[in-house]
Amino acid sequence: MTSDTRPKILANLHTHTRRCKHAQGAAADYCQAALAAGVGVLGFSDHAALPDNRWLDVRMHSSELADYCREIDTAREAFPALTVLKGMECDVDPAYEPYYRDELLGRLGFDYLIGAVHWFPYQGQWVGAHSGIRDVERLRAYTAWVIEGMQCDLFAFIAHPDVFGCSYLPWDRDAEACSRDMLQAAADLHMPIEINGYGLRKPVIETPDGRRRSYPLHKFWELAQEYDIEVVITSDAHEPWNVIGNIDEATAMAESCNLRVADLSRLWTKAARGCG
């Protein structure tokens, strides 16, 4: 594709690196791919290192955090034509909020954080959001935890709120009710929510209502147009060649549902002033 016909993608704010153990490539690899794709702003948001090193199978060890920061800072210098932001995808848990605020946003000067629910508490245990929501009680517990994240004032947006569709398969009155609860909270709290391109790269699944993507859930986003919300469209890149993967398709979904895209330019404006 020539530079004249390349799609004009302003930003992708959801980018992983090899440090999360389920992605490929270093920061420089993603920067090179972003420039080739016409991206102007690239935000790195690997799964946050946690002070107690919980869930290490899908995130860096706390001892790797300094190297992660140095790698992104080096990429900023090596790719001056690209605005590179330093972020992290942070699992919702009020116990970590002081660490997110004081260490990541504070001492280390991260430009932004994404809130996400990959696990949620249920009857004294942590349940996986991708695989463990197989009844309405767990769906409601997941919903409550997503809303908990929306109520936190540290996140620029909430990632893949509809990821419950990976394991809660029917679109029934409970799925609709929980979706409405999340959408109303997003509207009330003015919290942007993400249409996630990574889900569009995953295989379709069989459900009682037929074959569909596990997420993004089209029925969720159809409901979203009834609420005064804003969306963030990302590729959730796990490989450099997917640095803008499926953003066009996710954008088309937003347009078909008449959804308003959030203006997060304050993140890179702040970084450009050296305040990030």
Image (tube, helix red, strand yellow):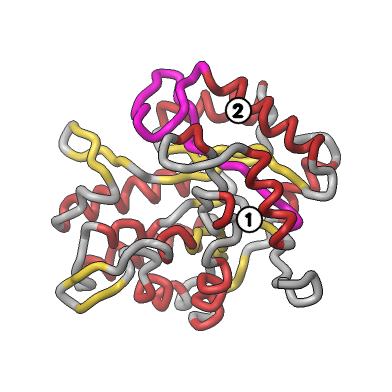
Of residue 2 and residue 78, the one placed in the foreground of this image is 2
**Would you place residue 44 above or below residue 19 in this image?**
below
Which is more N-terminal, label 1 or label 2?
1
The dot on residue 68 is 2
Q: Is residue 237 visible?
A: yes
Query: Does the segment drawn in magenta span residue 44?
Result: yes
Give the image location of residue 142, x and y in percent: 28, 49
Which residue appears farthest toward the bottom when viewing the image?
256
How many numbered circles does the render carry?
Answer: 2
Left or right of 20 in this view: 88: right
Q: Which residue is drawn at 50% across and 32% down?
A: 19
> Which amino acid lies under the numbered mark 2 shown in the image of this protein?
Tyr
Query: Does the segment drawn in magenta span residue 141?
Result: no
Left or right of 9 in this view: 171: left
**Helix, strand or loop status at disc 2:** helix
Give the image location of residue 267, x and y in percent: 72, 47
Give the image location of residue 149, x and y in percent: 44, 44
**Helix, strand or loop status at disc 1:** strand
Q: Residue at x 61, y 51 (%)?
A: 13
Which portion, as a residue range, is magenta? 39-63
Left or right of 6 in this view: 262: left
Q: Quadrant of residue 37?
A: bottom right
Q: Quadrant of residue 123?
A: top left
**Would you place residue 220 above or below residue 127 in this image?**
below
The dot on residue 12 is 1
The quadrant of the picture occupied by the C terminus is: top right
